[in-house]
Every structure is written in C-alpha cells, then in structure tokens.
Image: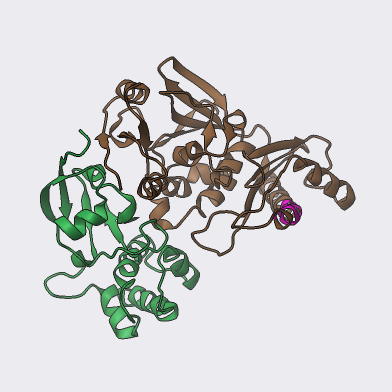
Chain colours: A green, B brown
Amino acid sequence: MSGGTMPVRIKVNGRPFDLEIPPHHTLLDVLRDDVRLTGTKECCSEGECGACTVLVNGQAACSCLVLAVELDGQTVTTIEGLASDGTLDPIQEAFVSTGAVQCGFCIPGMIVAARQLLASNPNPSRAEIQEGLAGNLCRCGGYSRILDAVALAASSRR
Amino acid sequence: MRTFAYLRPPTLDQTVAALADPEAKPYLLAGGTDLIVRLRRGHLRPTVVIDTKGVRDLHDEIMPVGEGLRFGARVTMTSIIGDARVRKHFQALVDAASVVGSVQIRNRATLTGNICNASPAADTVPALLIYEGVANVVGPGGSRSIPLAGFFTGPGRTVLGRGELLESVDLPFPKAPVGAAFGRITRRRGVDLATINLCGLVSSDGTARFAFGAVAPTPLVSSDESGALAAGRSDAVARSAALRGLFANARPITDVRGSREYRAAMLEVMTERTWQLAAARLNERLRSSGS
C-alpha cells in the first residue's frame, strides 16, 4: 500500500471533490496543490503559526497537522469560502476597514480563526479575542489592528 | 514526509491486530497534533499509520461510569473544556486542557494522545494524576486497567506493550470535597510547552496530593497526609516544609526551556501558589455547600 494513493471525498467550501491522495499528504498540501485554493498559507508546518488555519466540520484546525485521508467524507471551509456572491464576510470587511492587513500572509488564518471565535462567542472581550487568536502569529506585528478588526466585526454583527 | 500505509479499521479487534502485526512498524493516529510534526521531521518512520477515528468502540464522548467519568480515546481538549461535569468535578483538568497549544490544536488533540505521547511536560497529566486517573488498556492479551501513576516509564515511554492501546481513561469523583488547581510556567503565554507544570489537590480531610511535570523523566505524584496542607492551616513554616517534601524527588534538568536551577526555584514558588489556589477553591466550595 505504501507509495499508493487512496480515494478521498472532501467537501471544500460547499463543493465536493473526489481525489486520489497519497496518505502522507496533508490537508494543506491537498488544498493548495489538488483543490488549487492557495488562500490557505503554508508557513511553520508544525501547528505553531496558524497561517494554514481552516475549518474542519466548523472547527478551526491547522491544515498542516491533518492528513487529507483523515477527512474522507468531511467538510472543510477555507478563506475562499467565507465571501458569498462576491460580498465579503463581515470579518473580512472589518480587516479591510481597520487596516489590519500589512503583508497579508497571516490574514487568511487570522480571519478563519476569528470566524470560529465569533461563531462560538459572538461578543468576546479583548482577552477572549487574544485567546481565540493565540494560535496565529503575525510577523509584521500588526496585532493591535487585528484585534481591533475582530472587535469591530463582533460589534457590526450585533 | 515519507510515505506510509494508512489504515482506518472499524473495530477495536482489527485495530489491535494491526498494531500487533509483527511485519509492520505501526503508529496510532488520534488527533495528529504531535504525530504529524514528528512524521514530517522524520523522527518517526512508521510503515503504517492506524487512524482511531473510524473505530466504533473508541469514543469521542465523556461518559458517566460508576462513581466517576470515563474519557474515551477520541475525546479532545475542546470537549473537555466545554463539559459541565468535568468543570464541576475536575476543574484542574479543565484548566490544564485550556492551555494546551491553541484553539486549532485543542480542537483535534486528544487526552489519550497527550498521555501516550508521554512527554514529561504533558499539561493534562498532572491533573489526571491528582485525580487518581486509571488507564483502560486493550491489547492482544485482553484488557487491563492501570493507575496512571504507574503508566509512564520514561520520556516518550509507557507500560503499553506491543499491540496495546489506551481505550479510555477513568477519573473517579473525589470522595470528600476537594479544591484543585493547575499551574505552569512557560516562556510565552500562548502555544508553548511547559518549563514546569503542576497540579495540587487539597481535600477537606486535610490531605493533599500534588503532581509535577517537566521536572523528572516522568511526571511525579506525591501525597501529604500530615495535615500541614489542610485548607484552614495558617502555619506557613510547617506548610512550606510539607510542600517541599512533595517535590523532594524532582530531578529537573537544563534544556531549551529553562535551567535546572530556574526550575528548582520555580518549583518552590509554583507549589506554594498552587496550594494557595487549591485551598481557596476548597474553602469556596465548602462555603457554598454550607450556605
């Protein structure tokens, strides 16, 4: 079996994909190279930086720490799946209007992590936002505006 | 990452058989948050990875069992943190599970994975030790239950034999009212491994049980029955001596996270603080149940 591929059906952003995947390919590999969605970023590859954060069945996960074959039959949401009909998600809007995006590399992971945070806690305190994004690093150091953006997104939803 | 075969057996028997296969170099996959890092680094080179997520008899639920709770093999840190029964009876475990990695890690990392990884710094293990957790193990020879205090044999090593896996963990409800607390020191607040970690439990019968991580090759657990650590006691000299006795077997080493001397100094500080919080929580519990 080593060296071969396995059939995997994953629903990404509502669309089913039937793929043949080697077992050692991560969800991150498959999203970028097979599904061709490159919004999810590869950075540390060991679950420290959060750049590769996606939602697996609605729960934030580092896609670098998940084998794609683990997710047969499951649902994944990436940064590309947040906007609908050309309209940005309120969290994305808030990142733009707050000026939270500098180089932008960490932002997809930040926004997906914020999405789970606001889904489970629609009215987070500053400390809760910090905790919810503790698994996401920004090398530009743009944390204050990122936190502002999540707070703004929370208040605009109310 | 090197390639491997991936198995997703539907039954426990097939899982045990795959693990016990003498032709294979198998490794068990639960949450994957440690395993996949080690696969990528080449530290582990299994020929087959066996995923627990399809196994019917390995549960992702926390179930009542006898006078306690049973944590199935696939229970994640996030489910522990969100469970009202665990919060009520095993607060220090919730506190420990809450600082493992990040939200992304806690959503997938399992309690049994944290145990079987057998890191001396595993954050949930001191909590499981003060609550007298028991490991339910299944393997080719059948099932056996092992107190977690005797589960670890060295860094990354446990008593699990070839073909054995951790099916669940039981935590008995404490018999008397207790207060418990978790403490740890890390270099940064989020997403870091513990320089030291510990849990303390103070019981209304005057006894105390503490467990320490990252200060010896395996997590340490010890008890004090002198009464010097009872929640109401104000004799700081006797208390300090009793607390020092609890970590007398600690043998901290110097590594990237801290020096031997720093760990030894912090043991003293953190043991006192953890006792203070555990005793305060016991007093609070006794007050609220008495009123």
In percent of width and height, residue B273 lies at: 72, 55
Residues B42 and A137: in front is B42
Quadrant in the picture for residue B218: top right
Residue A39 in view in this figure: yes
**In the image, A7: left or right of B7?**
left
Residue at 52%, 22% (x, y): give it. B145
User: Vertical placement of B7 versus A107: above or below?
Assistant: above
In percent of width and height, residue B2 lies at: 29, 44
**In the image, B18: left or right of B251?**
left
**In the image, B161: left or right of A63?**
right
Residues A11 and A22: in front is A22
User: Vertical placement of B51 versus A30: above or below?
Assistant: above
Which residues are the magenta region? B263-271
Quadrant in the picture for residue A53: bottom left
User: Vertical placement of A96 versus B239: above or below?
Assistant: below
Residue at 70%, 52% (x, y): give it. B274
Q: Can you say which quadrant of the picture contains the N terminus of chain A?
A: top left
In percent of width and height, residue B83 lies at: 46, 45
Q: Can you say which quadrant of the picture contains the C terminus of chain A?
A: bottom left
In percent of width and height, residue A143 lies at: 43, 77
**In the image, B250: left or right of B18?**
right
Residue A60 in view in this figure: no
Q: Main secondary structure of the magenta part?
A: helix
